[in-house]
Image (tube, rainbow, N blue to C red):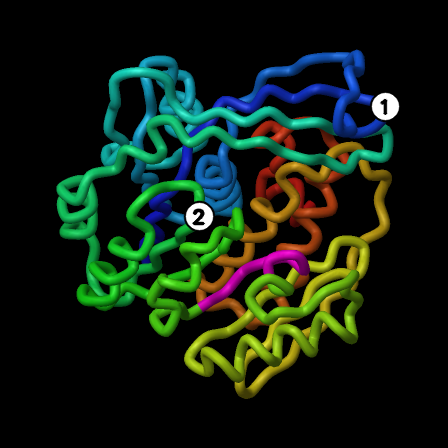
Amino acid sequence: MRILNFGSLNLDFVYQVEHFVRPGETILSDRLDIFNGGKGLNQSIALARAGATVFHAGRVGSDGQRLVDCLADNGVDTRFIRRSAGPGGHALIQVDASGQNCIILHGGSNQQIAETDIDETLDFFAAGDILLLQNEINHVALIMEKAHQRGLNIALNPSPITASLSDYPLKYVSWFILNEIEAAALTGNSGQADSRTGEQMAGRLIERWPQAAVVLTLGSEGAIYLDRNHVVRQPARRVPVVDTTAAGDTFTGYFLQGIAAGQPIHEVMLKASAAAAICVSRPGASDSIPWRREVEG
């Protein structure tokens, strides 16, 4: 079973700060690091490091060759990455003293995917293959429609949350992989979620889209898998937190690799949680994603 990740490719400018900048405030950063990133790139690297056969599709700008090289160096098939004139996608990320982050994203070439890109890419894949999508590129709804027509199974990480999500054909999604903020936006919940309220939110998603399974990550509260027949509650591992930027992407990659390999869901959740725990103990985005041997060692 092959996995196609039609996703974003960004350069991440990461600023270490004492606290997040407030309205009208100017602060100094302690350090600036530039990483290869984007939720799409991060998740493809997580898939590859977990051992999946993964292809990445998307667009980079004139500054994006290092992103393509990064994917290829990690074992990702990059034949479906096209080039656009002008700047590519990039993100400005603040990481505070506790390791939490906030992100400003600029789409760049990620918003220049053409319908011909979609058709030429999807024609390579077959029914039963997995398509992974985030919400950092254009034409997500169209990609979902065309993938469904070809019989692909769709995994959606609905990040960032936008008004356009309500227009997506979410009835075609096989797996929703999301955090508490994203689940709250889709269910109309508010407030901080814990394992109990998180399970309630996941249940509401199942009620609305009963064809899907829901994988809800809850940070220090762990993660929950829910479908019409199963509930798996996975506690989080306790580790020193350095940077949470790629934690969700790491979890997503390891989860889908396990699904593609046909592993039992409780084993999939355990492995994805262990990988995310290693990730948050390191700085950076894609650089912090562990290899399979580290997770299983």
Q: Residue at x 59, y 83 (%)?
A: 230
Q: Residue at x 34, y 45 (%)?
A: 6
The crowd level at tag 1 (other Cα within 10 Å; few <14, some 14-19, many 20+) is some
Between 184 and 251, which is closer to the camera in this rendering? 184
Between 176 and 258, which is closer to the camera in this rendering? 176
Q: How many marks?
A: 2
Can you tell which mark lies on residue 178? Answer: none
Q: SS at mark 1?
A: loop
Amino acid at pointer 2: Asn
Assess whether residue 180 is covered by the magenta stretch: yes
The answer to which quarter of the image holds residue 155 is bottom left
The answer to which quarter of the image holds residue 245 is top right
Q: Is residue 175 left or right of residue 172?
A: right
Between 185 and 260, which is closer to the camera in this rendering? 185
Which residue was labeled with disc 1? 18
Q: Residue at x 61, y 80 (%)?
A: 203
Disc nearer the start of the sequence (1/2): 1
Which residue was labeled with disc 2? 135
Q: Is residue 148 left or right of residue 273?
A: left
Amino acid at pointer 1: Glu
Q: Magenta residues, as a range?
A: 175-182
Assess whether residue 254 is covered by the magenta stretch: no
Query: Measured along the vertical axis of the image, is residue 239 above or below residue 83?
Result: below
Query: Measured along the vertical axis of the image, is residue 87 above or below residue 170?
Result: above
Secondary structure mostly seen in the magenta stretch: strand
Q: SS at mark 2?
A: loop
The answer to which quarter of the image holds residue 78 is top left
